Image (cartoon, rainbow, N blue to C red):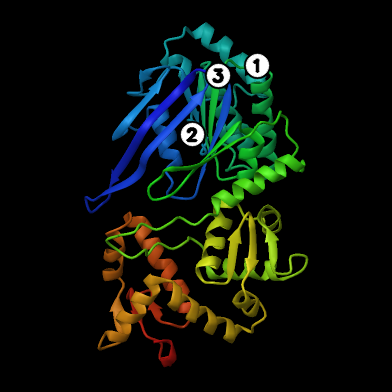
């Protein structure tokens, strides 16, 4: 089967505010073959959207090669179209004018532009809305306009970057099914689709292959082939088994490097209330301490982007173990779920201090200081040595919240200072 898109050893870095390059993608090899839909999955920092923009010709690569139909990708290609999460419509243009933009850029004559845009709007379910402005439409209808704008140029390759994530569940599912119906019914000439998603079930329902990327930097770590006819039933046994398999692959812990310049100060982006809510849910019936991750996702109504960091936090803190798409509370996790508030905070503080290097470093620095108080800025600078500025600040925010909840230190928001508690738990040193 011919390759529409071929990436070989692709690497990409961005320069942080301090001038240090941050590696986003490293050694990525990827092929989109004619006649297939490929979904890209990965946690935050995996470079999924950057990879999609390299394919679209919107972002240049730093290393390796990228080709479309055998030709180097050096900028936007006429045969590649992209649908964005944010709709990206021009609010002062009508629906018709937004859809015609790509055709106008290609130099298509006005009458032909109008004819093709009308036909696409009818195909995508927006017949009669050509004269409306984007603000007059619902979110689902605005995304239909974005999809019509991408498809009207008859692209070989359609790229979809979180195209359904800004919509409610029912609208997103309806729109996804409509796209699949057009694709499987060969009502559009598109020969390949790449979908970036945070939703595992969405990826399994759509894709012929799922590519899973690791984070910091993004590398392809797993690939799952899906040989099931569409439309697929979400509660079918084979579909549920595939969802379980992908959950298992997504929750595998990254093996740390043998040598590193800094300890691993990265923290999962979740808060204490969410950690405790998920732990309590797993501890209660019908789970009773062990839960299937897809079932847990349904019960919590958390997105995969919210659930995965929470699961990672639970495992880092020694309160749960995640394996084979299941989460199981440890004996400590069961104890935590049954404890009163004071006991929970004491246990949380001990586990954070024992298992979270950044929190331990902050605590030790405070204990060693003469005043028991320190500015947050040295810790931000420390984190910026290994991560982007925004992420460094968010990581410190998480460490502050976790440490405060565990009563390891306090934080003055006005002065941006960390201090030891007035009543110090000396046994936590």
Q: Position of residue 156 (x, y in %)?
A: 51, 18
Mark 1 secondary-structure assignment: loop
**Numbered circle sitting on residue 88:** 2
Tag 3 secondary structure? loop
Observer-side mark, 2 or 1, equals 1
Q: Residue at x 61, y 44 (%)?
A: 200
State the separation of the CA atoms marked 1 and 3: 11 Å
The image's mark for residue 405 is none
Q: CA distance from mark 3 to mark 2?
A: 24 Å
x and y, in percent, of residue 279 in the image: 63, 69
Asked if the residue at tag 1 contacts the one at tag 2, i.e. Cβ–Cβ closer than 8 Å, the answer is no
Residue projecting furthest to the front: 258
Can you tell which quarter of the image residue 164 is in? top right
Q: Earlier in the sequence, mark 2 or mark 1?
A: 2
What residue is shown at x 54% (from left), y 23% (from top)?
Answer: 192
Kindly state the secondary structure of the residue where label 2 is placed. loop
Compared with residue 216, is residue 346 higher up or lower down, i.e. above or below? below
Quickly name the residue at label 3.
191
* Of the image marks 3 and 2, the number of the one nearer the N terminus: 2
Mark 1 or mark 3, which is nearer to you? 3
Please give the residue where the numbered disc 1 appears in the rendered image. 187
Of the 4 image quadrants, the one containing the C terminus is bottom left
Does the image show residue 315? yes
324 on left or right of 424: right
- Answer whether labels 1 and 3 touch (C-beta < 8 Å): no
Q: Quadrant of residue 132?
A: top right
């Amino acid at each position: 089967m011919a390759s529409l898109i071929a990436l070989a050893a692709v690497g990409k870095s961005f320069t942080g505010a301090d001038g240090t390059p941050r590696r986003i993608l490293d050694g990525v090899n990827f092929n989109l073959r004619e006649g297939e839909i490929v979904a890209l999955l990965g946690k935050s920092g995996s470079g999924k959207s950057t990879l999609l923009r390299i394919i679209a010709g919107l972002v240049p690569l730093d290393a390796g090669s990228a080709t479309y139909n055998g030709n180097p990708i050096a900028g936007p290609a006429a045969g590649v179209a992209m649908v964005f999460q944010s709709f990206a419509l021009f609010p002062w243009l009508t629906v018709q004018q937004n859809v015609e933009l790509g055709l106008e850029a290609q130099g298509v004559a006005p009458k032909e532009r109008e004819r093709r845009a009308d036909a696409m709007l009818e195909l995508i379910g927006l017949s009669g809305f050509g004269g409306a402005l984007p603000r007059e439409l619902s979110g689902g209808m605005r995304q239909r306009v974005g999809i019509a704008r991408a498809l009207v140029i008859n692209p070989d390759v359609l790229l979809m970057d979180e195209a359904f994530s800004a919509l409610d569940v029912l609208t997103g599912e309806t729109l996804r099914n409509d796209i699949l119906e057009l694709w499987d019914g060969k009502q559009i000439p598109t020969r390949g689709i790449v979908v970036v998603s945070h939703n595992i079930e969405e990826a399994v329902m759509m894709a012929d292959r799922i590519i899973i990327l690791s984070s910091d930097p993004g590398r392809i770590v797993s690939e799952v082939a899906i040989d099931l006819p569409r439309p697929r039933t979400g509660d079918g046994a084979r579909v549920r088994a595939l969802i379980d398999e992908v959950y298992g692959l997504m929750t595998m812990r990254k093996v740390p490097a043998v040598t590193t310049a800094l300890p691993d100060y990265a923290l999962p982006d979740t808060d204490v209330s969410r950690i405790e809510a998920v732990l309590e849910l797993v501890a209660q019936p019908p789970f009773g301490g062990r839960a299937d991750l897809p079932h847990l996702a349904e019960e919590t109504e958390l997105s995969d982007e919210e659930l995965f960091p929470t699961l990672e936090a639970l495992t880092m803190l020694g309160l749960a173990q995640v394996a084979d798409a299941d989460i199981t509370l440890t004996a400590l996790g069961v104890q935590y779920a049954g404890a009163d508030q004071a006991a929970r905070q004491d246990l949380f503080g001990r586990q954070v201090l024992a298992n979270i290097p950044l929190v331990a470093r902050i605590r030790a620095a405070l204990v060693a200081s003469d005043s028991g108080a320190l500015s947050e800025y040295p810790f931000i600078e420390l984190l910026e040595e290994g991560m982007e500025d925004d992420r460094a600040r968010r990581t410190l925010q998480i460490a502050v919240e976790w440490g405060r909840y565990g009563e390891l230190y306090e934080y003055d928001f006005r002065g941006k200072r960390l201090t030891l508690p007035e009543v110090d738990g000396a046994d936590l040193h």
